[in-house]
Amino acid sequence: MQKMTTDSLDLPLTVTVDVRADPPDLQDNTADLDRLRQALRRALMAMGTERSVVIPFRFMARVGQAFRDAGFRGHAVVNVLDDRFECVDFLAQSPGVLPAMALDLGTTHLEATLIDLQSGSNLARANRPNGQIKYGADILARIHYATGQKDGLAILQQAVVDSINQLAEDLVGQAGLEVEQIRALAVSGNTTMVHLLLALSPYHICREPYTPFVGWPDLFCAVEIGLMLNAGAPVWVLPSIGSYFGGDLISGILASGLDEQENTAMLIDVGTNAEVVLGNREWLIACAGAAGPALEGGVARMGMRAGPGAIEHVRLDQDTWRLSVQTIGNKPAVGICGSGLIELVAELFLAGIVDIRGKLRRDTGSDSEARQQFIRTHLVEEEDGLSFIVVPAEQAGHGSPVILAQVDLDAMMRSKAAMYAILTTLVGQVGVDFADLDTIYVAGAFGKHIDPRAAITLGMLPDLPLSVYKPIGNSSLAGAELVLRSEKARRRALSIGQKITYIELNVNQEFMIRFSGSRFIPHTDPGLFPSVPIIKIDEGA
Amino acid sequence: MQKMTTDSLDLPLTVTVDVRADPPDLQDNTADLDRLRQALRRALMAMGTERSVVIPFRFMARVGQAFRDAGFRGHAVVNVLDDRFECVDFLAQSPGVLPAMALDLGTTHLEATLIDLQSGSNLARANRPNGQIKYGADILARIHYATGQKDGLAILQQAVVDSINQLAEDLVGQAGLEVEQIRALAVSGNTTMVHLLLALSPYHICREPYTPFVGWPDLFCAVEIGLMLNAGAPVWVLPSIGSYFGGDLISGILASGLDEQENTAMLIDVGTNAEVVLGNREWLIACAGAAGPALEGGVARMGMRAGPGAIEHVRLDQDTWRLSVQTIGNKPAVGICGSGLIELVAELFLAGIVDIRGKLRRDTGSDSEARQQFIRTHLVEEEDGLSFIVVPAEQAGHGSPVILAQVDLDAMMRSKAAMYAILTTLVGQVGVDFADLDTIYVAGAFGKHIDPRAAITLGMLPDLPLSVYKPIGNSSLAGAELVLRSEKARRRALSIGQKITYIELNVNQEFMIRFSGSRFIPHTDPGLFPSVPIIKIDEGA
């Protein structure tokens, strides 16, 4: 809602500006702070910008004293706002580094980097659990705690502020610095996490018509929410588009460059929700849906987040009928993460052990002995139906078998159906064909670990050449780094927020139809997936 | 140092803006605060301004909740900054009045008005002593206390903040309001008083090259210095040009309109210093000098500020040789204020009892019996020379005679000489003749009470038609009211600060020469004062 300046600078969120003023004398005894502001304005105009220069009240005494002590020349520390510059400190010597913290504010995990705004280099990287977890595992539970418990909002704010302060300590510890040296913070998170950090009520986020309290908070100081960074450090929060479309996805768009490309491309970010954006430099359209739970871990009985001991890759050799699994950190298996689950089900489908409806099958027709042996070993009848033993108890890290139950498989089928329905609804909305897409960016751990081949086999992702799929890592964090480094990126973030069209899937009929059609492997219309072999299962089993 | 906007609005410092937004629904579930900001921006654009609209962090929760509670329509309370609008509150109902406080922050006295920014009307007026007095009577003593005592600066700040809070209570008491309803404050004071209010070091103000810490502080909130006004109330401080040229004089220029007039005019403000400005809408030149002490009270033995019992007018009838005095409030005389002193000395000069060198004379030549009787009654020989009994003990309010001693007269002579020297130096600087001036504005109590005829007789003010002299009352307070009411006035104040030329008299040779020439009544060159009769005193006395 700010009026944008039109100068062409591309400044970091915080900069140091070399200021040289003459000391006062009887011919010019302009007041110290006015002298500084004039010199600073001159320096900034020489750089090509005419924005206002202000010295906020609470920094006046410190800045003025430091300016005089430094002999009226040195380095002004300046926060770069859209409509003004704020001088918050003055240093006699160049600080060498100007550290800033980029934060991916996840519901369960925080990940952060420390970057030097002067050189642009990365100084440190760290992660920690979100300290709010003990008050609620997921977003809904947090909202209920914040709005239903006495002081719930303040408690949740304090919990995550503590986590961020610890993370800041981790970062400066690695870099051999002090937290007071951190001069800026950018935060990229989902809408609810941002509300809880700012102690703004998330009450209406989860209630129709799903209205956040704030989408784009104006810049504030880290100390205002209790962060132990430098007193002048500003906090830039990536804007949210809606209750289910947060700043983390704006970050993804920034990091992928979707909003700057001539060719239409797509961005997929699977967390608790699947969030998808389609567009180019002319237009952007987005939607989000609950596609993720079975993939993110926590829903499937053996599901878990990508972490040590999580099965991330699965291969089934149909000659030897040997199942090989690869775990993160090569630790004994303790569970299965999203990418592992997708590969497992794809392999079982290709082996005829999961049918097109996503059901485990124990067929005993014209099978080879090796296959029959494999089925006897791995499929067990349990109370609630068949289950598949991925890793037997004696090989597992916790002494219990790692098992895929039919209920887990059903959940995964819903997730994969939702994902494909989201993607087709989105392209259908603007009349684009999947084949028109050069690139599909896949964000996060999902993008990093997933085998697109397996996802295509399941009919979760469209049947495109594998080179179309590009993993882009933690793009939430990457976006936070970008806005710290570049004003152009900050303007892009706000402009994305203003131009994006968001489709509510809850109220979309077409989505529901597409969802039903997607609940087969790969699809009710296998013609959509020409690269996926048609698996004949002996129906006599 | 702010970049000025170019829109043509002339808004008060704080305004309410009628905001009407649609409630959120599934088609538009924009976040509450973004919705408010958009609606506010639309309303402001309809008014003709495109400045940024921000909601500062500490008001977000309150503003957003109030906006929702009011059904997304009502009245946003908005502070008007040069480069942006800040929304600090939201009211469901129109507040009726929007009270703001204008403050003349004097060294000894505070005077304030409460005005309604909606109607422009005055709601109340009050004054109080400056609570800092007990730490030092004058500016120098305060500076020494602030910089020499432990916590001196904080103690002085608290003292004046307490006084202002009490004054605010006085004002709202008169108006039947609460202090929390005061939505803005403008402060007009000398440079040192502003520093002490803001707790910024005045150390260099009184030390060559006389450099203030700040001339033009950026806008801040009243609560930041401990004032008990509304949490969102901004403080606008009239800028200072230098250590001895404060915001109170900028106020005087604003109130007189000197900076907007085609014809060159002059403004004289006599307080502890005499501050004089000459100029028109093209240029402004100013200087200040220590002309005031004898006139302001506190230096002359019987001198006092204008207050109950102070002699403000004196007439000596040369037919009856009766001396009549008029006191403020018609109370028994307890002292003599500046205007009374000037009239007394003028009358004594015209009666031949004070000579052209400013000395009391007891001449006993060819006088009438009545005159001889008058001299015998009123002139007494004291240890340090002659003194003049203005009011005998039995008629005085405190049982002691009100006396004009030669030392007091000497001080007054220095003051009047300094004043005339300042005025002639200033006009000489730009080659203007006194006769070119249509108007000489005379500010403050001095302007209100002084008889220009008497001041001309003494050679203190130039010999111009009496209609040229225009008293303008407390122009420091009037200027503070103007900047509260009008953005145009705020821009004028800053533009005055930028275009005025300030002459340091301390280093001005010409001033010293003119000062010497002015130490006669009316002047060494009586031709400069054609309207003043030449008084022959029998030198044989």
Image (cartoon, coloured by chain):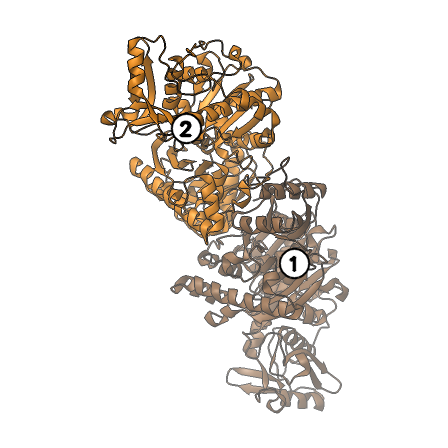
Chain colours: A brown, B orange
Examine the image and state in which quarter residue B307 appears: top left
Amino acid, disc 1: Gly
- Amino acid tagged 2: Val
| Residue A540 position within the rendered picture, expressed as x and y whole percent measured from the top left | 63, 82
Image location of residue A275, percent across then percent down: 60, 60
Of B229 and B430, the residue lying toward us: B430
Q: Determine the image quadrant of residue B286.
A: top right
Q: Circle 2 is placed at which residue position?
A: B407
Residue that numbered label 1 is attached to: A479
Residue A526, image x, y percentages: 69, 67
- Label of residue A196 in the image: none
Q: Would you say residue B116 is visible in this rendering?
A: yes
Q: Please state the horizontal and vertical placement of residue B248, each as a whole percent of the image.
A: 47, 32
| Chain to which mark 1 belongs | A
Disc 2/disc 1 C-alpha distance (Å):
78 Å
Query: For mark 2, does the 10 Å Cα neighbourhood hold few (<14), some (14 to 19), or many (20 or more) residues?
Result: some
Q: Secondary structure at mark 1?
A: helix
Are there few (<14), some (14-19), or many (20+) residues within 10 Å of tag 1? many
Residue A113 horizontal side relative to residue A464, left or right: left
Q: Nearer the viewer, residue A387 or B148?
A: B148
